[in-house]
Image (cartoon, rainbow, N blue to C red):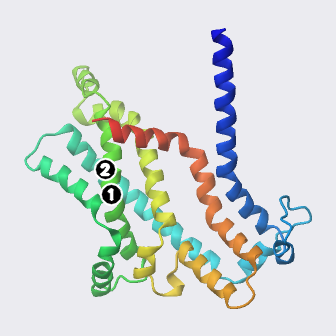
Amino acid sequence: MRKRRVRAKTVIFSIIGLIVAIIWVFPVYWMINSSLLPNVVLQDSTPTFVPFGGSFANFTAVFAGGTFLPALGMSVAIAAVVVVLCLLFAFLAALAISRFRFRGRSGFVLAVLLIQMLPAEGLFIAQYKLMASVNLLNSVIGISILYIAAVVPFTIWMLRGFVAGIPIELEEAAMVDGLSRTQAFLRITFPLLAPGLVASGVYAFLQVWNEFTIALVVLPDNASATLPLWLRGFIEASASKATDWGQVMAASTLVALPVIFFFLFVQGRMTSGLVSGAVKG
């Protein structure tokens, strides 16, 4: 009897999970489906759920504009700079907080928490004036500095959970066996921190790739637009005439697909990183 109840609960929860998954996936599927259909079909009152007879003409039209690839390059360059430097700074800070006791440690931890409470909108004017004063508007370096400042605090907390979750006794045992402190850290502790670094890197990447408002402020030149800014400009250009929703959906798909595939590939490690950073230490 108990086994039947357990099986029934398993089936019910599985069905609920499947329904939730379908609801979550459907908007993404509808975007991709619409990107393969001509505008005439999309404007029909009868929805088309399967793109039979569809084509890649909308994607060809998006690339024909010649602005997508420069925006893609800008986003990739910014994401690469921010992820590498953010992980470096956050890793060192998390290591210092978790492994060492020093004057001002509590104040530093409190400052990290308080920074997270600042509304981003309240900093836009100061950020714009700062970047303009040092001639870093419309540059990868300028916006990367702002992104690093915004992402590093939470990344520190994520990595702090991983560092605190690794017993320092492992390093001490390795040192007893003849390794130096640096060798013990690199050979024993650092490999165990790899999932945390991956999770933190994914978080930083997602924050930077999808960010819109800061980029709108410090990247006013269309030639320096990131993908979110490019997509806004593409939609506005389409709205100036009869909106071609097929092309709009194709443009949205090109922006979203890299993030979707990347997140699906590493979502397990990212979830563990978020949980560990929240409950450990």
Q: CA distance from mark 1 to mark 2?
A: 6 Å
Q: Quadrant of the N terminus?
A: top right
Residue 167, percent from left and from top: 28, 27
Helix, strand or loop at label 1? It is helix
Residue 10, percent from left and from top: 65, 24
147 and 18: which one is in front? 18
Name the residue furthest bottom.
240
Q: Which mark is residue 152?
A: 1
> Which amino acid type corresponds to the residue marked 1 in the rendered image?
Val
27 and 76: which one is in front? 27
**Whether residue 83 can be seen here:** yes
CB-based contact (under 8 Å), mark 1 and mark 2: yes
Instruction: Judge left or right: residue 15 versus residue 168.
Output: right
Q: Quadrant of residue 165?
A: top left
Name the residue furthest right.
53
Instruction: Judge left or right: residue 151 versus residue 51.
Output: left
Q: Find disc 2 in the rendering and name its residue.
A: 156
Q: Is residue 216 above or below residue 199?
A: below
Q: Quadrant of the C terminus?
A: top left
> Which amino acid type corresponds to the residue marked 2 in the rendered image?
Ile
**Whether residue 162 can be seen here:** no
183 and 218: which one is in front? 218
